[in-house]
Each structure stands twice: as structure tokens, then as C-alpha cells.
Image: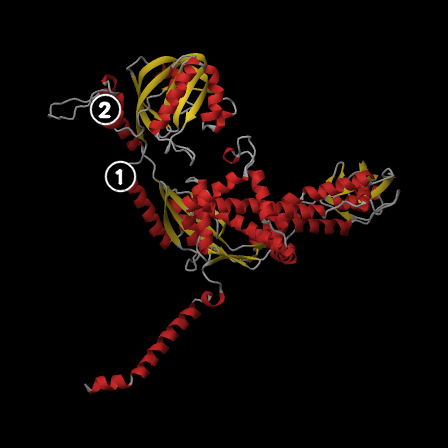
Amino acid sequence: MAVLNKIRQRSLFLILIIALALFSFVLADLFKNSDALTSKSQNIVATINGKDITREDFLQKVEALQRQMGPNATNTQVMNRVWEQEVRQAVMETQYEELGISVEKDQMRDLLKTSLATSPEFLNEAGVFDENKLNEYIANLKETSAAAYESWVNYEKQVAANALQQNYFNLVKAGLTGTLAEGELEHKLEGNKVDIKYVQVAFSSIPDSTVTVSKSDISNYIKEHKKQYEVEASRDIRFVQFNEVASIEDENAIKTELETYLNGRFVDETGRKDTIVAFSKVKNNEDYINHTATSDLKFDERFIFKSELPTAAADSIYNLEEGEVYGPYKDNGYFKISKLIAAKQIPDSAKVRHILIPFRGAQSAAPDVTQTEAEAKTTADSLLIILKSNRSKFPEFVTQFSSDQGSVENEGRYDWHPYNTMVPEFNDFEFNGNVGDLGVVKTIFGFHIIEIEGQKDKSKAVKVGTIARKIEPSEATSDKVFRDASNFEINAGKGDFEALAQENSYVVRPVNGIKILDESIPGVGNQRPIVRWAFEEEAEVGDIKRFSIPGGYVIAQLVAKHKEGLMSVEDATVTVLPIIRKEKKAKIIRDRVSASSLDDLAAAENTSVRSATGINMKNPTISGAGREPLVVGAAFGLNEGETSRLIDGANGVYMVQVTKVTPAVELDNYQAAANRVEQQKASVVNTKLYNALKEAANIEDNRAKTQIQ
């Protein structure tokens, strides 16, 4: 009891001690994670010209775009698309704010009117855009669907953004003019011409092996040209890939199983009861294929032409008698046996016109469709009765009732198209019927009133039933691949990655220069996990890790970590070496040349004096030497008859003598040339302006830090 009293008496002291301990713990963690003190919140994806893009807003846009782009677009592709959109918007908004330009309410209405001028839902009876209908549409969206209204708001924002950008570009273009002085210069660059004689001492005349370029030479060049050789942080890896591929034994087992259905199986001397009727004997082919044989490809009851059969087996299958079976054969990753079920003559193309009556819930039905399925069927049947007695009303009914906007403008007509182009029910009606047939057909889109207007080129088509087995590795094969990959991972961690791979005849694939936001690994495809691992702070050069990939495994080793900054001498050598080598060759040539005339230089260098005529500054090319802007520029600085000193060019060292100067024809007025200059300036605005603004912008990219990639 006395102890408890002492604790109560000193409770304030204890609370203070605990508080200080907690504070020191938090403070230590902050110093350990310096980013928490010095970096922006992990919730900021980027800061562009002072404007923050939050993680929440960014990911919402990613989610919306992912739905729009569909499942085939990878998450990284979608994120990169959103990133580019966000950067562009932020960069351009900076310009709009500085200039004070915006889209006001009246202009927005005009923009929407222009954008929606051909949308049927906003046109009145006279076919003219009706603003009241637009207002009703927006009000209805706001009341009935928050998601749809949000999409509309985003659409308006996009229309406004496009208009602002166009206004900005037009302002820039308006400030770009071609003066008469620029016009005169343009005319003279094209029209002033010189004829020259020259001697070229080609760099190729000095063997590369005689010119020494040291690492320090390359390093100094990089430092002198920093902007050209700045690089992002990157990683180098190498990997061995283990693929789960069906073995010969696996393939033979699959073929043996298919042969059971080919030949049938009956009760044998052991008393087995699992009788299987031969494929050729069955009557209900769909049930046999889908359920008895449980084919990996389901039964397709369509007739097909020979060109649609598997290429390797087309002749064999096409020439079967009804009921005969062919196989097993390999096709597109499957082993198959195929049975010719039926054959008949079918047109290879047809021409039809139709009226589509949708119903609520039908695929692609517009939100304003209110008819139930039964009501839509009644409408279609009523129209059919009228059309059977008066087909001239077809175009009128198309305009009034059809929801298929793709064919309305053509009186509901789909011109000549191949077999199996349309959905199955539509296809069956137009190709199984006769020219002139008129009827109602239900599809996933609604009820179609179809008239067959033409058929041509009938030929043999076949209905084929196929039992297919995907060629996949067996469990035993997959287990072996896993063991091989695991053993390599363990042993490579103990020894030499490259040597161990060679010892086991595995192919080592190097991948250099991986960036932090890269997605694909050559030869493996989309593998963000490998990229993330390579850039983890804990990952050290030499580390090895196994990754699961579709159909196998990758054992990867981190080979090198390159910091952000200047390119390394090794990486820059491929581009810098030829430049320095040329500079050194030019010095060698200059040091050994004492000639002051073309003839003396040609004799000393065992070459010849050549001529070139009609050279101009607009296209600085010398006949026999190639593009040489420095040499051509020097020639235009000489008087007629004057000889130059040695000139370092792109392909050698030159001496030039001007033999003739032909000035451009003097014009009374250079306005036409000035207009061309103005057009040239304006033409690059759309392609280069944004990139220039982006390059000048202050962009802080935190995507890697916020771990959204």
C-alpha cells in the first residue's frame, strides 16, 4: 500500500519520463529516415512549377484510365499515360495563369455547341443544335448518376483544356513573323552559290589503331560537355530464365489420351467400366466434345471455309467424308483431333440492310432506351408486317427507329461483307437464307429486321468438331523446372553466376541501363518486380533473387548500380571515342602539313584536287565529300580566287579555294521569302513548343518515392 501511495505521489514525474522516452524514440526514427525531415510528404507524386499532384488524385485518374484502356494495358503503361497528361496540364496551366487567359461560361457554351453539333440527342426537329436539350441532359445526369455526371464534368474540362491550348498556341504563332530582312537572308542562303576546288585529307587515311585515346581523355571530354552526358540512376542485371515447357514425354502422353477418343475404349479383361465411344460414332458432338472429352476448346457449331481451317491440316480435314476423324495433329499450342460433321454450299459474302430495335439492358443500348425486351419484339414484329407489304418504307423506318448509327446514314445497309463477320444469329440469317428474305432476328444488341439484298460466290463450307488439349508441361516437368531454378539460385549465391550457368549450359542474358520507372525486361516482358528489387536500398551488387514469371522463373543477379549524374567513362566510350579520335587525327594532319597551296597539299598527301560547283549555305554539302557545314561556311567567307587555311571538317581536314562566286538574284521585294520564313516558324509551334516549355519547367518527380509504380 505504501508503494502504491509513492507511485501516486510521483505520477507526474513518471508521465514526464514516459513522454520523453516516446519523444526520443520518434526523434531517432526521424533522423534514421531523413526523408521524413527533408522530403515532401509521401502523398505528393510530383511538384510541377510549384503545383503539387497528390497520390489520391493521381491514382483516381489511373483507375479511370485503366477502365477506359481495358485489361490489355499494363498498370505501368496507364500510369505513364496519366503522368504525361498531368505534366502537360500543369506546364500549360502555368502559361495560362501568367498570361491571364481562361475559358469563360459563354465561350464554353460555344465550344460545346461546336463539339456536339452532330450529336442526335442535342438536335431539335429541324436538325439544329438545341441548347435546352443540352441543359436537360446535364441536369438529368446530375440527378440520376453521380459517376456519369463526373464523366461529363471531365469531358467539359477536356474541351476547355483543348481550347486554352489552341488559344495559347495561336497567341505564340501570332507573335512569330518573318521580317523583310529575314526574307532577304533566306533568299541569299538559298541563292548565293560558290564553286570551289578543294583537297580533303580524310580521317580514314590514318588507321584507328595508331591513335591512342585514354580514359582521362574521355573523362575530360565528358566534363567539358556535361549537359550531353547527364544520366539518370540506373541498374545493370543479368539473368537466367527457366521455362516450363512440355517435354517430349508430356506431348506423347497428350497424344495418347487423344487417341483414346479417336479409337474408343471398351470393357477389357480386367473388368474396366469406363467405356468411351469413338469420336466418329457419336451423334451428339457438342456434348461429347464439351463434356465427355472436356476439350480445352469448346464446340463451335459455325460452318467455316477451308481458309479458316488450321493451315497444316486444312487439306486433310476439308477432304474428309462426313463422320470421319483426322488427327492427332499439332496446331497453335494444342494437339487436336477433328471430325467433319457436315458440309454445305454457303455464299462467301452477302449484302443486307437492317433496322435495329434495342431494348433496355441490351448490349450498347443507349441510356435513354426504355423499351423492355417484349416491347422491342412487338415493335420489330409490327414494322416487319408493314415492310412485307411495302418495302419502300425501309429507309424511312431506319431513320425513325434504328439505333445502329453505323448504318443509318447508308439506309441501314451493310454492303458486301464476308461470312462470319456479324454476330452468329445475324450471320446465320443472312447466309443460310435466300436473297429477298425478310425477317426478325434477336441478337445481344436487340431485335434486327433484316432484308437479304444479295449473296455471291457459293462454295463448300464445313462444320468441324474438334477435341483439343493444350500442350502444357506435366506436374513432374514443372516440378523439375522449379528444382533446377532453385538449385541454380542457391549455388549461384555461393559461387560464380556466369561460370555456373556455363557449366549447366544455361543462357545468361545481360540487361544494362535499367531506369527506376522502367517496366519491361527484354526477353521477359512486363516485370516491374525485378526493376523494383534492383532499386531497393538494401539490394547490393552481387545479390541474387528468384522471380516467378508467366510459364517459369527468372534467377536475376544485380551486376552494377549507377548513380544519377555524369555518364561513366565506360558507358560514354562508344560515343566519345570517335569524336576524340577525329580531333587527334586532325591534329596529326595539321602538324605534318606545311603546304600552302592545293597542289602542294595534294602531292604531299598523295591525293588529288577535286571540284564542286553550286554550293549553297542552305544545304552545306560538298560533292565527293558529303555534308560539311564548317567547310562550306569557311568557303563563303573567302573572296573569289582566295585559298583557305586548313579547315577541320566532319570527315577530314580540308583546304579550299573559291573559283567562282555567284550572288543570288536581287529581288525588288522579299515579302514572299519573308512569308515563307513566317510559315516555317509557325509550323514548328505545334511540335516543339510544348517540349520546350516542359524542358524549362521545374518538375520534381516523386513517383518512385511514393511507390505508385
Q: How many marks?
A: 2
Q: Distance between the residues labelled 2 and 1?
A: 22 Å
Displayed quadrant of residue 621: top right
Amino acid type, label 1: Ala
Q: Please determine whether, in this image, residue 279 is positioned above or below residue 552.
A: above
Q: Name the residue under label 1.
A: 476
Q: Please determine whether, in this image, residue 124 is positioned above or below residue 407.
A: below
Q: How crowded is mark 2: few (under 14 residues within 10 Å), some or many (20 or more)?
A: some
Secondary structure beneath dot 2 equals helix
Task: Indicate the quadrant containing the N terminus: top left, top right, bottom left or bottom right.
Answer: bottom left
* x and y percentages locating residue 409 in the rendered image: 52, 25
* x and y percentages locating residue 41 in the rendered image: 46, 62
- Foreground residue among 424 and 112: 112
User: At x 38% / y 52%, what residue is drawn?
Assistant: 545
User: At x 53% / y 30%, what residue is drawn?
Assistant: 125
- Foreground residue among 546 and 446: 446
**Which numbered disc, 2 or 1, marks the residue that appears first in the sequence?**
2
* x and y percentages locating residue 245 in the rendered image: 34, 36
Displayed quadrant of residue 291: top left
Find out whether the residues at labels 2 and 1 contact each other: C-beta distance under 8 Å.
Answer: no
- Camera-side mark, 2 or 1: 2
Amino acid type, label 2: Thr
Residue 349 can be seen in this image? yes
- Foreground residue among 694 and 358: 358
* x and y percentages locating residue 120 in the rendered image: 51, 33
- Foreground residue among 357 and 702: 357
The colour scheme applied to this rendered structure is: secondary structure
Residue 609 can be seen in this image? no
Q: How crowded is mark 1: few (under 14 residues within 10 Å), some or many (20 or more)?
A: few
Q: Name the residue under label 2.
A: 260
User: At x 37% / y 73%, what residue is drawn?
Assistant: 25
